[in-house]
Image (spheres, helix red, strand yellow):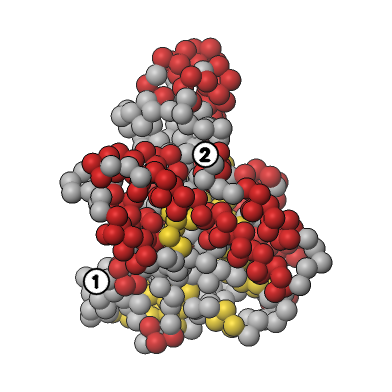
Amino acid sequence: MVRQIHLQALRECPDKTWLGAWPKREDIDELIHEDVDVYLPSGELAIVFRVGALKSTLPVEDGGTLTPDALKYWRWVSKALRTDQRGFAAGRDIVSNPEIRLTIGQSEFFSKATRAKSPLIDAEEALAVLRADENPSRNTYYVGRAEEDGLVDLEEVERWDSICRKKNVESSTRTEAVANRNTAKLAWFWKWFEESWIAANPEDRPSVAKAARKRYVTTQPRSNMCYSNVIGTINRSGRLPYGRLTVTTLKKWDEFVAQRDFYREVNDIFRETHTDKFNFLNETFKQVKDERYNLFGTAFTTITVNNNFDVAYHRDGTNAIGGQAALCVMEIGDWKGGEFVFPELGIGFDIRKGDIFIGDNQGLIHGMLPFREQTPGAENIMFVFYSKQDLLWMDDLDCEMCRKGFMEYVLQNHPERGEGKGAKWTGSYAGMWQSPEWVAYKELTGMERCSDTNYHGTGDDE
């Protein structure tokens, strides 16, 4: 029998306090180990949890269908990418790659020094802002541009970097070399600050700061590093404005296809236990322009696969509006911890092999307690099945690949479109999908049917 939990109220968990913070055991009033349906105070079914229902994540010796070859494939998928693109899920306090980042104070400085009204121009006030928080931020800078402009002592960097590269170096020596190398790299900001911003007349400082932010500060935030990969379909973005099957998906395509019974079993349990939400998603994603965007006829388009990822509190931001996510795990070795926590509900779920969780990962803050007492080589491989909203306005996959081809065509034939964009220009430019070059390229390739929409699915200039 399935237990029902009807919540009377939700805890207040303000985003500013909770997002990016690490879950704690005291955030849980009850840890669930049984079949349960959780209802919000509104009466809406928010979460379904079923224990041992998913045979695809249970090894054959435990009565499931998970073979050693399948587990080997998923282990490869889960560790094929170490990324810094998981935002708050990877934690608020930044510890990864400090040498490529602005400090929180420097980020605040650029924000205040470039604002339209009453920009920061006083040197003492600027120093106070810069010194207020010298911890690394998620904002990064263009390392190559800082070096190109002579803001970095490259000989000093190389002196310490050469020690970092040596194999037989004592750990204390390597740690010292890394710290000194990072200090040498990060000195670029203070050199610019002294020679450009401080040296400028106060009335010119806003324009100097704006020019520097445009030149040196990236627009792609980077969080802490973690093993978190994506398979299936991924939508357009500002940096890569074309949809595609992910690199990992294509690299071992046959193995990916061979797991379709797994995807369908998750889909079937979703349909049986959360019928209204399933019907909504299933009908919605029948509208995509390419059947390859659906995960082999399921209501899902994409799977995130994590490996031993301690997940900080966050919300999933790009899932389908009104959709649900399905979570499950495969296990290697013995481990404890990793409970899935919803602080607003005061509930945690101990998701183990064979279990499946289906619920609202967008509206509700969630995270995972850290793993502990792991045996050597123990791994938690976690799957998050979901549907990406932006796929609804993408063209079919052939047209999306045409968009990719157009960027390569622009790089070769229209270098003038990349003036001032640096050596790593990818071929994108403002208004490209309404440009005469795009029209000409579609005619050249016989792909006139491809749309003129930007990565948001509209006709506005990018």
Q: Position of residue 244 (x, y in %)?
A: 54, 39
Q: Quadrant of residue 163?
A: bottom right
Residue under label 2, please give it.
149
Residue 399 lies left or right of residue 277; in this view the side is right
Where, quadrant-wise, is the N terminus in this rendering?
bottom left
157 with respect to 344 (left or right): right
Residue 106, horizontal then vertical, whole percent: 38, 56
Numbered disc 1: secondary structure: loop
Residue sitting nearer the eye, 393 or 18: 18
* Other residues around mark 2 within 10 Å, as few (<14) / some (14–19) / many (≥20): few
Q: Is residue 418 visible?
A: yes
User: Of all residues shown, which one is farthest toward the left?
Assistant: 117
- How many angstroms separate mark 1 from mark 2 (CA)? 60 Å
Residue contact at pointers 1 and 2, CB within 8 angstroms:
no
Q: Amino acid at mark 2?
A: Asp
Query: What residue is pinned by disc 1?
Result: 43
Which residue is more in the foreground, 167 or 430?
A: 167
Which is more toward the observer, 432 or 107?
107
Residue with the most extreme right position:
168
- In the displayed structure image, the side of residue 203 where residue 163 appears, left or right: right
Residue drawn at point x = 44 percent, y = 31 percent: 395
Q: Is residue 327 visible?
A: no
Dot 2 falls on a residue whose secondary structure is loop
Query: Between residues 57 and 13, which one lies in front from this camera angle?
Result: 13
Q: Residue at x 34, y 72 (%)?
A: 18
- Give the image location of residue 352, x and y in percent: 57, 76
Q: What residue is rendered at 55% in x and 24% in y? A: 411
Front of the two marks 1 and 2 = 2
Residue 286 numbered tag: none
- On the image, the x and y values in percent for residue 292 come to 54, 40
